[in-house]
């Protein structure tokens, strides 16, 4: 990266700290810390959910699949949009109307205290591993772009670039600090800022990539056969259907997303936020997956995991590559901060306060929440350091998502609708599915413990040849079958369902107002991006300079329109 790129990345990180500092003043109690006081505007919740699905792993994993296989990567990501629309219709409003402070509170009401322990530790392990992969992926990209002196204390002696362990520690530390200081408000606000930076960077890089390729016609004629098919090889229609189902349960019941459903003023706002998220994921993959798709035409022999950043390096002028790295950092920071905040909230509210210190003051609980955020952040950094020993980013993401999401989250969603199922439904649903999933992952892997015997060789070969279909069947169909059997053999109305219904009735008449702070921060962020584009434009060739100045003018006009809307709202 050039000196300008480093300057842009530095000022972006400073901007995150500033937003975190502003949000710190809004933290008066644990509801502010972990639920934004229930005052988040619906569009902020929707954008935050959208960004929570992003990470550097998005660019490494899905960018790599786009480069290797083509449009199927878009199909996979559109599944998130379909799932989010279904969540908006069936689940988002239900979560909000319960009036819970944290998702774990619902688990305790519906399934009892023992379920809290199981869900907290299993979900925390699952999500921290996934987020650790994302932090590792970001560090890989950064290490490839930041050369140092071979004798520099932060350098990797083998490459001369920034060492992986220091990249993980540096950028993981940044996210931990602003999440600790500003709570969910900081997470929401930085997510909105990150959404702006991400889309600005991608909107800039796509036309430059297209021009580098020689136009759309040249691109179409130089890519492999089947590059524009919606499915490919292991990514079949069955896999896509299963991926939609998996992410319906993830977006509908994973705690970071439930947090987005309950931080808005009303059930209608929760549904609108989910619809915004879904709409964005139906449309946006066609935009932000174009760079690796186009790069296949530029360089058909590249490392697929580096295709996204290599495409950016090939076309971006000085300063803009730093903005692209800021966008990739943004994506990862959003996922990391969301998970840190939600699990720090659960440990503070549902463990420390309820069971250890019920007499603790509000200020004391906020301090505990911040300490736990730092502790979880340390664990996350350790996991990221261990990713190379777990098989690499792509394999970890696909397998852990396919095998673990539905068994863990299905009972929570089923329990919103079913009057019958009780606490005992959790153990067979998760236990059977996770045990068989572990057998598939570790027993029938190419070098698994069952492959040593010749009798299992043919079984292992078949499983590996159809691994995505097998993982989808075990991860989706099996837990649904187990829970359906439990449901039809259970009679009466469970006490947990009655407790949830009573909690919902208690909060029917509570209505909160949205905060104007997000719109103010968006207006200032857009203005700052416009100033940055103006500044960088003067150091570029004429054609690139005109493009950057055009972007800057558009951003200024949008910023001005938002500022005018804020003033009119205050007058009314």
Image: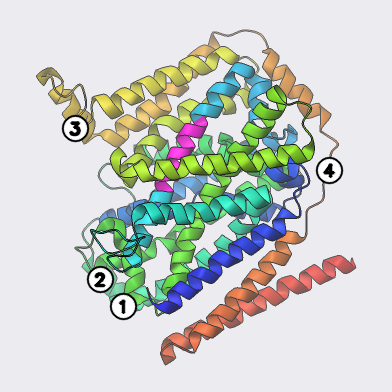
Q: Main secondary structure of the magenta part?
A: helix
SS assignment at label 4: loop
> Distance from label 3 to label 2 (Cα)?
34 Å
* First reached walking from the N terminus: tag 3 or tag 2: 2
* First reached walking from the N terminus: tag 3 or tag 4: 3
Residue drawn at x 50%, y 64% as measured from the top left: 198
Q: Is residue 519 left or right of residue 324?
A: right
Residue drawn at x 58%, y 52% as measured from the top left: 177
Nearer to us in this view, 320 or 287: 320
Let me know if residue 144 appears in the view: yes
- Local crowd at mark 1 within 10 Å, few (<14), some, or many (≥20)? some
SS assignment at label 1: helix
Q: Look at the image and say whether residue 561 sits in the magenta stretch.
A: no
Residue receiving disc 1: 212
- Local crowd at mark 3 within 10 Å, few (<14), some, or many (≥20)? some
Q: Which residues fall within the magenta stretch?
A: 123-134
Residue receiving disc 2: 298
Identity of the residue furthest to the right in this view: 572
- Mark 3 against mark 2, which lies toward the viewer? 3
Residue drawn at x 19%, y 63% as measured from the top left: 301
Residue receiving disc 4: 511
The dot on residue 422 is none
The dot on residue 446 is 3
> Distance from label 3 to label 4 (Cα)?
56 Å
Nearer to us in this view, 434 or 121: 121
């Amino acid at each position: 990266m050039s000196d300008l790129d480093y300057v842009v990345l530095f000022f972006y990180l400073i901007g995150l700290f500033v937003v975190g500092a502003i949000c710190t003043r809004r933290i008066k109690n644990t509801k502010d810390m972990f639920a934004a006081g229930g005052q988040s505007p619906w569009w902020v919740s929707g954008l935050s959910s959208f960004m929570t699905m992003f990470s550097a792993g998005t660019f490494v994993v899905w960018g790599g699949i786009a480069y290797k296989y083509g449009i199927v990567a878009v199909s996979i990501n559109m599944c998130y949009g379909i799932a989010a629309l279904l969540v908006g219709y069936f689940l988002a409003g239900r979560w909000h109307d319960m009036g819970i402070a944290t998702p774990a509170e619902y688990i305790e009401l519906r399934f009892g205290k023992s379920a809290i322990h199981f869900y907290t530790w299993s979900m925390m392990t699952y999500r921290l591993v996934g987020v650790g992969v994302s932090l590792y992926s970001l560090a890989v990209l950064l290490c490839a772009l930041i050369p140092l002196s071979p004798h520099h204390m932060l350098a990797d002696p083998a490459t001369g670039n920034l060492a992986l362990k220091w990249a993980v520690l540096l950028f993981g530390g940044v996210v931990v600090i602003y999440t600790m200081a500003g709570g969910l408000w900081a997470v929401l606000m930085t997510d909105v800022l990150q959404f702006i930076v991400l889309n600005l960077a991608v909107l800039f890089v796509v036309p430059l990539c297209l021009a580098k390729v020689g136009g759309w016609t040249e691109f179409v004629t130089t890519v492999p056969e089947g590059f524009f098919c919606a499915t490919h090889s292991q990514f079949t229609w069955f896999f896509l259907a299963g991926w939609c189902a998996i992410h319906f349960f993830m977006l509908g019941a994973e705690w970071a997303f439930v947090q987005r459903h309950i931080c808005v003023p009303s059930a209608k706002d929760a549904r609108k936020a989910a619809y915004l998220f879904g709409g964005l994921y139906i449309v946006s993959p066609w935009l932000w997956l174009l760079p690796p798709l186009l790069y296949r035409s530029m360089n058909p022999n590249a490392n697929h995991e580096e295709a996204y950043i290599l495409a950016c390096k090939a076309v971006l002028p000085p300063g803009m590559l730093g903005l692209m790295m800021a966008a990739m950092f943004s994506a990862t920071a959003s996922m990391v901060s969301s998970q840190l905040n939600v699990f720090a909230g659960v440990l503070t509210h549902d463990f420390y306060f309820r069971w250890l210190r019920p007499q603790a003051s509000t200020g004391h609980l906020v301090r505990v929440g911040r300490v736990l955020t730092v502790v979880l952040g340390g664990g996350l950094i350790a996991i990221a350091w261990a990713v190379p020993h777990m098989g690499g980013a792509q394999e970890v993401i696909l397998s852990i998502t396919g095998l673990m999401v539905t068994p863990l989250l299905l009972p929570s969603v089923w329990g919103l609708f079913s009057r019958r199922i009780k606490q005992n439904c959790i153990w067979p649903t998760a236990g059977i599915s996770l045990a068989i999933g572990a057998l598939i992952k570790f027993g029938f892997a190419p070098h698994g413990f069952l492959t040593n015997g010749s009798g299992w060789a043919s079984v292992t070969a078949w499983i590996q040849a159809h691994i995505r279909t097998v993982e989808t069947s075990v991860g989706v169909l099996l837990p649904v079958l187990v829970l359906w059997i439990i449901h039809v053999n259970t009679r009466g109305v469970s006490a947990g369902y009655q407790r949830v219904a009573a909690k919902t009735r208690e909060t029917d008449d509570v209505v909160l107002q949205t905060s104007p702070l997000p719109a103010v921060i968006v207006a200032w962020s857009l203005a700052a991006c416009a100033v940055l584009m103006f500044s960088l434009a003067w150091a570029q060739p004429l054609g690139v300079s005109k493009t950057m100045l055009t972007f800057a003018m558009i951003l200024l006009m949008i910023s001005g329109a938002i500022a005018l809307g804020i003033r009119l709202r205050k007058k009314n």
